[in-house]
Image: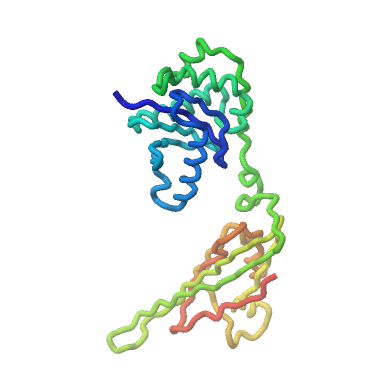
Amino acid sequence: MAGAVSALFLLDIKGRVLVWRDFRGDVTAVQAERFFTKLLDKEGDAEAYSPVVYDDAGVTYMFIQHNNVFLLTASRQNCNAASILLFLHRVVDVFKHYFEELEEESLRDNFVVVYELLDEMMDFGYPQYTEAKILSEFIKTDAYKMEVSQRPPMAVTNAVSWRSEGIRYKKNEVFLDVVESVNILVNSNGQIVRSDVVGALKMRTYLSGMPECKLGLNDKVLLEAQGRATKGKAIDLDDIKFHQCVRLARFENDRTISFIPPDGSFDLMTYRLNTQGETSYLGGSPG
C-alpha cells in the first residue's frame, strides 16, 4: 500500500501558511518554511520546476500552484507521487466549485468550509472523496463566493490596443537603434551583381502616460517634395513596414513617423534599399 501524507498546507505566494491540516502528527508547520526556502534556492534551475522536492530531514514535498496559492503535501512515507498530485488538482476543482475561484482571498473568507472539505477529502493521510457534487450533498455550509469579473483589459477596448493606461516612470527614457545587414551577390569575376541593405529601427521606450512621439528621417522623397537638394546622405527607402502604432495617413502626407509607442522594446519599422555595398546612413530628428 502506498504511503500516507503527513500534512497538507495551503500557502500564499510568499510562502506564508494560510491553512494547514495535520493528519499523522509527524511533521510541523516549520516544514512549509523549509519547503519554500528550498524552492527559492532552486529558482532558475530546471529542478525548480519539479513538483516533487526532497528534504534531507526525510520529508518529501509535493506541490502545485494555482493563481497565488501553493497547495503542498509533506510526507515521511513513500507516497505515490502521481496519485498525490492528482489529488491536489482535485482539491483545486472542489474549492472552485464552492468559491467560484481559488485564490488567497477566497481561502481567507472561507476558513470554516476549507477545513470541513479537507477533513472529508483526506483521512489519516489517504485521499477520500474528491467529487465536488458528492461533497456538496453533505457539506452545506454557506461559502462566500468570489465575484469573478470577465471585464476585458483596457488595452482590448482602447483605441491604442498596444499600450495599457496608467503607465508611470520616475524617469522618461527612449532608446533608438538602427540595425542593418548588407546582402551582396558577387559573380565569378568578383563584380557585384546585386546588393541591398535590410534594416530595422529598434526602440526601447520607458515613457509615462500616452506620449505622442514623432520621428523625421532624411528621406529622399520628403526632401524632393520640399524642394531641397538630395545630395549627400538622402536615401530612398523600399519595402517599408511599420509597427501598428504608426499613423500611416500622417506618414503618407508629410513623411513624418508619428506614433504612440508600446511600453518596452519593439521594432518601429523595417525597410530595404538597393545600394552598392554601402550602409544607408539612416538618420533623423526625433521629437
Residue furthest toward the top?
138
Q: Is residue 123 above or below residue 172?
A: above
Q: Quadrant of the C terminus?
A: bottom right
Horizontally, residue 237 falls left or right of residue 56, namely: right
Q: Viewer-proximal residue, 22 or 200?
A: 22
Q: Is residue 124 above or below residue 155?
A: above
Q: Viewer-proximal residue, 18 or 56?
A: 56
Q: Is residue 166 above or below residue 264?
A: above
Q: Where residue 256 appears, x then y in whole percent?
A: 66, 69
Residue 23 visible in rendering: yes
Horizontally, residue 100 falls left or right of residue 91, namely: right
Q: Quadrant of the N terminus?
A: top left
The quarter of the picture where residue 230 lies is: bottom right
| Residue located 47% across and 15% down the image | 133
Q: Where residue 116 appears, x then y in whole percent?
A: 53, 18
Q: Is residue 29 above or below residue 278?
A: above
Q: Where residue 226 appears, x then y in whole percent?
A: 68, 78
Q: Viewer-proximal residue, 153 or 281?
A: 153
Horizontally, residue 54 falls left or right of residue 227, namely: left
| Residue located 35% across and 28% down the image | 83
Q: Where residue 200 appears, x then y in whole percent?
A: 52, 69
| Residue located 41% across and 23% down the image | 125
Q: Viewer-proximal residue, 160 or 25?
A: 25
| Residue located 38% across and 29% down the image | 84
Residue 51 visible in rendering: no
